[in-house]
Image (cartoon, helix red, strand yellow):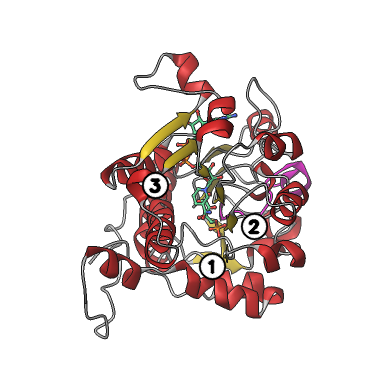
């Protein structure tokens, strides 16, 4: 069985080696029709667009993306082509929540913000948003949740409109998938009109997908003081990000909010499960995350410990110093642990 695999999926090689001796590892953005023509399965990240241009005429029967987001998968084409596919729902949700928690702790420590006095708006409350909700409530924050699809399904919980988010929030964080169709598309959900309606000069956090926020409109909102600050992990046109927006953002990271070792291992295990189920194979043993480095010595109170485990300002400094290395910074990322 031939499996083509993105070469930046960590920890997976040993398990794949127990499944096939014909695994081809390649840079995600370089995987092309010639690579997949005679393949049975494809294991990708967000850097491989899986559509007709890649797959027409190939023998691929199964695709797994080791990510939560799947806007790089052309699901309609795969259905028509009879190719089964899977993503990894929730795999790195705790990692993204860790990122947002660290941002809140930096606001508290470095900006002297009293979290108990703040209103946080969560736009999109699925795997990630729910973890952010629990965490923010734990800090005594008032939290407003906008999630029209869940509200329409009659899910439990109090939901608000985007108008409420715009009017009442001091911090707004986006956790939606990138969609262009359907009843509630998220492409440019935060556009110029959104920024013009903001009442409280909030901090904007985007760890979802770059194009959920119109980056040009966000830049103008920063320039004209409509927002207090921006924390940007996901960018329009990655890796060619807007240098002006990079310069203005308080925290600017290269799409690594989900890059915990724990999240990567979760994704690997889900992918291996799906692959073995699809092809009726015996499952190799579960993969586990690596231990924390011996040099890690916990110090201080709970806030200090959490910032010691992960401080996004470190990633931000690296990206600001060399934005041209956006993909390298991701590809060679020192994966963090979510907890001790
Ligand atoms: N920066 C990073 O490293 C990572 C980014 N992500 C991104 O975060 C997104 C969210 O992840 P999850 O929470 O796991 O997804 P999820 O699918 O569990 O939750 C998304 C939520 O957004 C809601 N939603 C959809 N359209 C909406 C709209 N127009 N307005 C408000 N809510 C809307 C859905 O009803 C759902 O509850 C992913 O789709 C992915 O693009 C995910 C993991 C890592
Ligand atoms: O899971 C997702 O969705 C993400 O955005 C990942 O955390 C990052 O994607 P890749 O770097 O693995 O493509």
Foreground mark, 2 or 3? 2
208 versus 229 height, above or below: above
Residue 47 among those drawn in magenta: yes
Badge 3 element: helix
Earlier sequence position, callout 2 versus callout 1: 1
Residue 317 among those drawn in magenta: no
Highlighted range, magenta = 42-58
Report the residue marked by disc 2: 47
Q: Which mark is residue 8?
A: 1
Mark 3 closeness class: few <14, some 14–19, many ≥20 residues within 10 Å:
some
143 sits left or right of 79 in the view: left
**CA gap, disc 2 to disc 3?**
23 Å
48 sits left or right of 45 in the view: right
Residue 141 makes an appearance in the image: yes
Badge 2 element: loop
Disc 1: residue Cβ within 8 A of ligand 2's nearest atom: yes
Mark 2 closeness class: few <14, some 14–19, many ≥20 residues within 10 Å:
some
Earlier sequence position, callout 2 versus callout 3: 2
Disc 2: residue Cβ within 8 A of ligand 2's nearest atom: yes
Badge 1 element: loop
Q: Quadrant of the C terminus?
A: bottom left
In percent of width and height, residue 304 lies at 28, 69
Report the residue marked by disc 3: 276
180 versus 297 height, above or below: above
């Amino acid at each position: 069985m031939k499996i083509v695999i993105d070469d930046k999926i960590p920890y997976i090689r040993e398990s794949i080696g127990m499944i096939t001796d014909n695994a081809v590892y390649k840079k995600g953005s370089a995987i092309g029709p010639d690579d997949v023509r005679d393949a049975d399965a494809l294991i990708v990240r967000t850097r491989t667009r899986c559509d007709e241009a890649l797959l027409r005429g190939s023998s691929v029967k199964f695709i797994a993306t080791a990510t939560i987001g799947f806007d790089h998968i052309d699901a309609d084409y795969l259905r028509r082509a009879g190719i089964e596919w899977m993503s990894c729902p929730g795999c790195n949700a705790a990692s993204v929540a860790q990122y947002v928690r660290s941002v809140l702790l930096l606001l508290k420590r470095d900006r002297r913000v009293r979290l108990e006095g703040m209103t946080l708006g969560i736009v999109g409350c699925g795997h990630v948003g729910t973890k952010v909700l629990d965490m923010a409530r734990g800090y005594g924050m008032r939290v407003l949740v906008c999630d029209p699809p869940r509200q329409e399904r009659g899910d439990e919980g109090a939901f608000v409109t985007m108008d409420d988010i715009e009017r009442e929030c001091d911090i707004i964080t986006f956790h939606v998938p990138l969609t262009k169709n359907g009843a509630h598309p998220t492409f440019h959900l935060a556009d110029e009109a959104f920024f013009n309606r903001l009442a409280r000069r909030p901090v904007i956090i985007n760890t979802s997908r770059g194009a959920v926020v119109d980056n040009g409109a966000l830049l103008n909102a920063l320039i004209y003081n409509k927002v207090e600050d921006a924390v940007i992990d996901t960018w329009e046109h990655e890796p060619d990000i807007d240098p002006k927006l990079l310069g203005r953002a308080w925290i600017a990271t290269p799409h690594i909010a989900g890059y915990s070792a724990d999240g990567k291992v979760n994704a690997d295990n889900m992918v291996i499960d799906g692959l073995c189920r699809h092809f009726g194979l015996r499952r190799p043993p579960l993969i586990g995350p690596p231990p924390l480095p011996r040099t890690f010595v916990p110090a201080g109170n709970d806030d200090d410990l959490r910032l010691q485990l992960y401080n996004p300002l470190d990633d931000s400094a690296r990206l600001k110093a060399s934005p041209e290395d956006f993909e390298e910074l991701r590809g060679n990322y020192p994966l963090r642990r979510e907890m001790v």
